[in-house]
Amino acid sequence: MPLMRTILALVLAPLLAVPPLTPGAAQAQTVPPAQVILVTEALPEAAANVAEGDAAEEEMPEGLRIIDAAGVDPADFAWEWRILAVMADTPNDPAFIRQMRDIADRAADLHERDVVVMTDTDRNSGSALRQMLRPRGFMLAIIDKDGEVKQRRPAPRSVRELNAVIDRFPLRRQEIMERLPSGRD
């Protein structure tokens, strides 16, 4: 698992203009240009805090969260966050690298839609996310706030495409109507 975190950090570091994370680095790091927070360790307590509401928002930094799926239960994010699961058998998978670069480039768009990115690049990890989705090779999945898997894809998708899919979810439409009562931007 440390190898996956190191490779993920190395892939994202040039895009985010930050040095790669080392095993002794802080658990979450905010990168202002792209607003990406790379959570390098599995944090079940952080996931539980996210589900608690306002108190958790004060503790967790602002920006898109990229979380290693090991030790995290996707059910902890229900009704608060959508999960974008990016899975591969190895962190060296070209599709995984491409997808993570695209996510880093458009992090603000995903954060606006209450998305948490969960990654798993170890086919033997046995994470709850891997058990739930049972990927074969690279897989991208969107799990809505209600815990339902809304879409699965065997190839990378642009964040623009992902946003279009998310914006068609009934829960997302309801959120848009609550934020913009006239239904207009």
Image: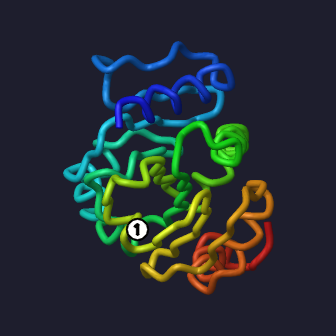
Report crowding for label 1: few under 14, some 14 to 19, many 20 or more residues within 10 A (C-alpha): some
* 75 w.r.t. 171: above or below: above
Amino acid residing under circle 1: Glu
- Tell me the residue at 68%/52% (across/down): 109
Q: Quadrant location of the C terminus? A: bottom right
Rendering coords of residue 52 (x, y %): 24, 63
Task: Tell me, yes or no, if residue 39 can be seen here.
Answer: yes
| Residue 169 image offset from top left, x and y in percent | 64, 81
Report the side of 173 relative to 124 (left or right). Answer: right
Residue lying at the far bottom of the rendered structure? 170
Location of the N terminus by quadrant is top left
The residue tagged with tag 1: helix, strand or loop? Answer: loop
Q: Please say if 83 is above or below 122.
A: below
Q: Position of residue 59 (x, y in %)?
A: 28, 42
Q: Residue at x 40, y 68 (%)?
A: 80
Q: Name the residue rendered at 68%, 66% in the picture.
A: 154
Residue 31 pos. (x, y %): 54, 26
Q: Is residue 11 above or below residue 65?
A: above
Quadrant in the rendering for residue 34: top right
Q: Is residue 54 visible?
A: no
Pick the residue in front: 64 or 12. Answer: 12
Q: Which residue is mark 1?
A: 80
Quadrant in the picture for residue 3: top left
Of 54 and 150, nearer the camera is 150
